[in-house]
Image (tube, rainbow, N blue to C red):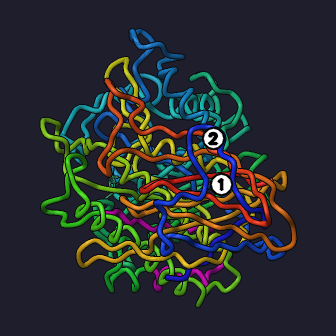
Amino acid sequence: MVRSSFILTKFASIVILGSMILFLDPQVSAQNKIQLSIDTAKPGPKIDRNIFGQFAEHLGYGVYEGIWVGSDSKTPNTRGIRNDVVAALKALKVPNVRWPGGCFADEYHWRKGIGSRAVTLNPNWGGVVEPNTFGTHEFMDFIDQIGSQAYLSINVGSGTPQEAAEWLEYLTTPLPTTLQKERAANGHPAPYQIPMLGIGNESWDCGGNMTPEYYLRQLTIYSRFVRNFNPAQQGDQQMMKIAVGPGGGEARWTEWTDTIMKAWEKRQWSWDMQGLSMHNYTVINWGNKFASVGFGEKEYSQILKETLKMEDLVTRHAAIMDKYDPEKKIALVVDEWGSWYAPLPGSNPGFLVQQNSMRDAILAALNLNVFARHAERVRGANIAQMINVLQAMIMTDKEKMVLTPTYHVFKMYVPFQDATLIPVTFNAGTYTNGDITLPGVDAIAAKDTSGKLWLELTNVDPTNAVEIEVSLTGSNANSATGETLTASKVDSVNTFDAPDAVKPRSVSARAQNGKLTIKLDPKSVSVVSIS
Ligand code: AHR
């Protein structure tokens, strides 16, 4: 399988520093040697940092326990927000956090989460009580503490345009309106910035069972009245309004994208949008989902085959968008993606608690690479979800916290935020298990904003190491340094008792005799900078 990817120059043997051995290894067979070339003279589009976005829904322990413990908690916190989680997320340079849902968003009424709180219910997720102690101000404080930005989802399903418009006025106006004064009385006189706004969530399903035409009417009305008044967010800095988009590969989603984009092409001055959402989870059999722990190579290969469908989905919907928007003004925002497995035994099934393994690390890298290769159109993505829910970065249990393999992948990919994609060419080879054959290797390359060249390499094969021989046109490479993430088994996980079972190790390689050779461990994700 031939892939576009990237790489390094002409030097020959490799010196390994750190714990990963990058020498030519007699155990690497000839068929597991891959040539990879990178052409730095042909820079591609910017990889928008927003493809590394997160999603925090009021669902299970995602917000309560995961972020919010309250200021009188024994867990160290700042104004009720746990310090350990904030420190871990800061290291990811999270570009945006989508909140408050998900399905929850279309039943959320923002006034219940400011001032004196109303205790309500969360019928979507476990039917539990929603205390509303984490509301608008707490979310904005959290965003501020982790150094991120807000991606709000407004309630289209059970709300009104007036309610949504007032939320935006409350958040963003600098002028002394009644809502501004209320915001000031609640502790924040200055207007907030809201760079991204989702107009509904899955309006074809939990967001209100709307047809494409019915949703389009809602979109045009909400888009007209929901305004961002922050002076810092006018003109070029305007808030992105993101319409509900497709939710999978079936024909009905083609119709959905077509309806919205066709209307946008013929839009009047009075409404607009800047993004179209897409949701796509990696799940096999919604009625009897795969386990997140205790699986073998069969389930590993099945899930990775399923996750690679993201490429086709993005390609197909990007093609529909191209028909109406050849200049690519509208971003495709994959604002829910990731693995969805069976709930862990003993957990509330409505809380979507699952473990996160080495398989999820590979899955994350493969999806991020799809988004990067489609950087011209995919300018936002939010993995579901940030803490304690689905494919999480972080898991918590009271005062304990553990970082997942997916967290480590996101951290390793930080240099790719806003970097310039550099084309890479390589023959990916194959990895076969039973009747499943997948590309054996995946890779992307990019130059960061300081001009440094970065290379990501994923070895999908869980058994065989691969040697990558890198050549770089137009300049030389002397060495590579970075990190690699692998584990003893495909289902290796981090737990509160063994938090470092899956943890990156440093690697470095020096090129000699014109070639740079990097050995990839089986089932590994590696990111190196080349100098
Ligand atoms: O992420 C869990 C749920 O999945 C979200 O609430 C919903 O939008 C999607 O169906």
Residue appearing at x 47%, y 24% in the figure: 115
Part of the protein shown in magenta:
257-282
Residue that numbered label 2 is attached to? 93
Find the distance from the CA under tag 1 to the CA under tag 2.
9 Å
Above/below status of 228 relative to 204: above
- Residue placed most toward the observer, 222 or 207: 207
- Residue 423: x and y, percent? 70, 74
Type of amino acid under label 1? Arg
Residue sticking out furthest to the bottom: 323
Type of amino acid under label 2? Lys
- Residue 408: x and y, percent? 51, 42
Give residue 274's quadrant in the image: bottom right
Residue that numbered label 1 is attached to? 49
- Residue placed most toward the observer, 242 or 397: 397
- Residue 179: x and y, percent? 59, 35
Residue sticking out furthest to the right: 475
Residue appearing at x 13%, y 62% in the figure: 287
Above/below status of 385 relative to 322: above
N-term mark: 1 or 2: 1
Residue appearing at x 45%, y 47% in the figure: 486
Q: Does dot 2 land on a helix, a strand or a loop? A: loop
Answer with left or right where residue 8 lies relative to residue 100.
Answer: right
Answer with left or right where residue 102 lies relative to residue 162.
Answer: left
Q: Is mark 1 within 8 Å of ligand 1?
A: no
Q: Does dot 1 land on a helix, a strand or a loop? A: helix
